[in-house]
Image (cartoon, rainbow, N blue to C red):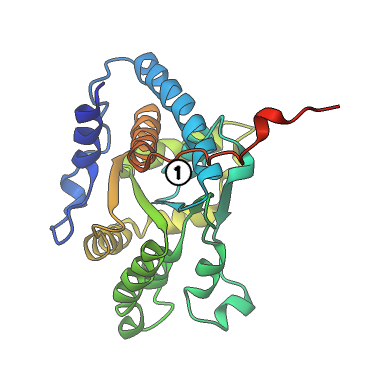
Amino acid sequence: MNISDYKRVRSKYKVTPGSTVDLSALPTAETGEFKKKKQAVKALKKFRKELAELQSRFYAWDKKAMLIVLQGMDTAGKDGTIKHVMRGVNPQGVTVTSFKVPSAEELAHDFLWRIHKATPRRGMIGIFNRSHYEDVLVVRVHNLVPPDVWSRRYDQINAFEKHLTENGVIILKFFLHISKEEQARRLQARLDTPDKRWKFNKGDLKERALWDDYMAAYTDAVQKCSTEYAPWYIIPSDVKWYRNYVVGQIITETLHELNPQYPEPEEGLDDVVIV
């Protein structure tokens, strides 16, 4: 695949700022140009090798940071994406933050306080497993704050992300889009597989019953908060290996375009003798 093919794949899943999104009309089970899993796995391995080299240069370059946001319904594959795409990178240069129910201290601050603390410093790739978008998703669906509060948060999120990008943070946001039918299969698999049963929570079924409410909330989030400086990508995620391939491709291509370089070594090293 050449550079134009990479950009074609990336543009296919990017949410154009200001566009209308209909999640029900978007595919969840694509496999792209791949007819077999092993073809995509081979391509992903190539990306991982490139990603490891690029991340090493990005870390040493130390001029920008990268923030990767992963959102999706339960079982969409946030953990799996991190595991399969980021395998092989230097863990010293990557942080993963999973946002759970806010603590009492976090609730005493504005909703972005805990998020800003977790953003990556220059040279680092930070991954958010769930994120500040929970405050226009679960908070909205469960009526945890009044509509006039959560409805203002889209503009606040856009302003926050613009602030980050103006200060050297590259933001990539991925909505892992699965079908309700695929979620049912994955939840059943958790029940049926002994070493996965620990992942099953009866609360997942209560959230599943609110599927339509979540789809409405996700639709608003990606429509209102996909910008040129912090775009959303809607990734078909019923097929896990294709999901991993597309996310890996977009991250790798973004780093390629940055073209980070190792810093120049200090002068006079050719004369150094180690004794």
Q: Is residue 185 or residue 71 the one in the foreground?
A: 71
Q: Is residue 79 or residue 264 the one in the foreground?
A: 264
Q: Dividing the image into 4 quarters, which one contains the C terminus?
A: top right
| Secondary-structure class at tag 1 | loop
Quick check: can you spot residue 183? yes
Q: Is residue 16 left or right of residue 205?
A: left
Q: Mark 1 highlights which residue?
A: 75
Image-quadrant location for residue 247:
top left
- At a point 42% along the width and 64% down the height, the residue shown is 167
Q: Dividing the image into 4 quarters, which one contains the N terminus?
A: top left
- At a point 57% along the width and 84% down the height, the residue shown is 108
**Image position, residue 193 (x, y; %):** 58, 31
Relative height, residue 175 to residue 9 (above, below) = below
**Looking at numbered disc 1 in the image, what kind of residue is underneath it?**
Thr
**Image position, residue 39 (x, y; %):** 35, 15
Q: Is residue 234 or residue 155 the one in the foreground?
A: 155
All told, the count of numbered labels is 1
- At a point 61% along the width and 41% down the height, the residue shown is 266
Q: Is residue 129 left or right of residue 182?
A: right
Q: Is residue 62 left or right of residue 17?
A: right
Quick check: can you spot residue 198? no
**Image position, residue 114 (x, y; %):** 55, 70
Q: Residues within 10 Å of mark 1 (few under 14, many from 20)?
A: many
